[in-house]
Amino acid sequence: MDDSQIFRHSLTYIHKACLLLERFQAAYGWATRWDKSELLALNVFDPPDFLDMPSIDPTNPSAITPIEHPVHVVTKHTEFLRVRVNDPEHQYQHLDGIVSSFQLPDLPTRLPLTALRRLISQTLISRIRPRLAFQPITAAQAHKLDLRVAHIVHHYLRFPFPFHSGLLSLPLALFGLDFPSITRLNAAAAIVGLQRDLNHPIKSFREMARITLTDWSCVLNSCRYPLAKPYPQRSFVHARKKLPWAWILAHKTLQALDSSFVPTDQSSLLHGEIGISHILNSSSTVASCFPTAALGLQMILHPASILRLPMTYDLPCLLLHRLCDVISHSYYPGWKIYH
């Protein structure tokens, strides 16, 4: 069960699932590294430091009676592939240790810039990039890592004065040194991760991502879609306990680049239980076609209410047809990025 996560709502079901997986992998000669395992307890009052988990005796895999292994209990984080999920501070400390311990080879002559750039890309950045893909860090932390890399290059080349760190990652066409930028790699990882979550090939993951996006829109942003222009003028850094940090960073990056993730599937707006105020707030295209006063939001709460209005109510049927037409023409599954 290494590099796996098991989610259950009670300890009893965790025990059952764990024992079944242990029996399954024992048939193939696999064994779990229990010293590396952790048990995450959410919303549990005063949990113990360790809990016993059932397993299979490696000396007798066919035994019916399981054995117990003590597992450390955590309450504030979960770890997957040796990366703490949604914990940019812990990730930064680990990456800072990688950069601080990096040393260039001690040769009789100094390497040229081209060889130095290739060496840093293949031996340092290649270790940082996959960890950023799992868990991005903050922009300030990424900038600190860029400063450390610039200091390594400056110390190696023995320049008489320190150069600006931005010059290190500037392209050659703009008279830079064309080194990889951790700041840009971090921002790109956040945007690519958000797009992958919203269009994930596994339905369960895709639906959980879209539920999170809906909560972001309705609970934190007044039913306004947060990833399209015009962007909300507020920051969502305070919502780090409600949103993945990678999504918050992706929102800030899209805002800085003046780009958007356009929701091309708006078929849910045709459901009768969706409030008209939500429809107008969530779609600028729909809102531009209908004046708010014309829809009488004080009297009409749902699109289904339009069908129950008396004939004396001054609301042309063309409004309803136009509303359905605008929404239905927006039905193309997936999230795409536009500049």
Image (cartoon, rainbow, N blue to C red):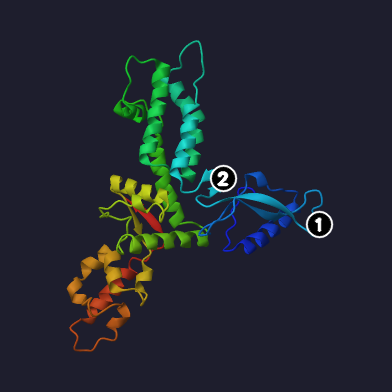
Q: Is residue 331 above or below residue 90?
A: below
Crowding near pointer 1: few (<14 within 10 Å), some, many (20+)?
Answer: few
Q: Is residue 269 above or below residue 309?
A: above
Which secondary structure lies at badge 2? loop
151 relative position to 40: left or right: left
Q: Is residue 175 above or below residue 218?
A: above
Q: Residue at x 34, y 64 (%)?
A: 218
- Count of residue discs: 2
116 relative position to 171: left or right: right
**Disc number for residue 81:** 2
**Disc number for residue 63:** 1
Q: Position of residue 336 (x, y in %)?
A: 38, 55
Which secondary structure lies at badge 1? loop
What amino acid is at disc 1? Ala
Crowding near pointer 2: few (<14 within 10 Å), some, many (20+)?
Answer: few
What amino acid is at disc 2? Leu
Q: Position of residue 184 (x, y in %)?
A: 38, 38
Q: Residue at x 52, y 44 (%)?
A: 83
Between 94 and 271, the residue placed more toward the observer is 94
Sequence-first tag of 2 and 1: 1
Residue 17 visible at all: yes
Residue 1 visible at all: no
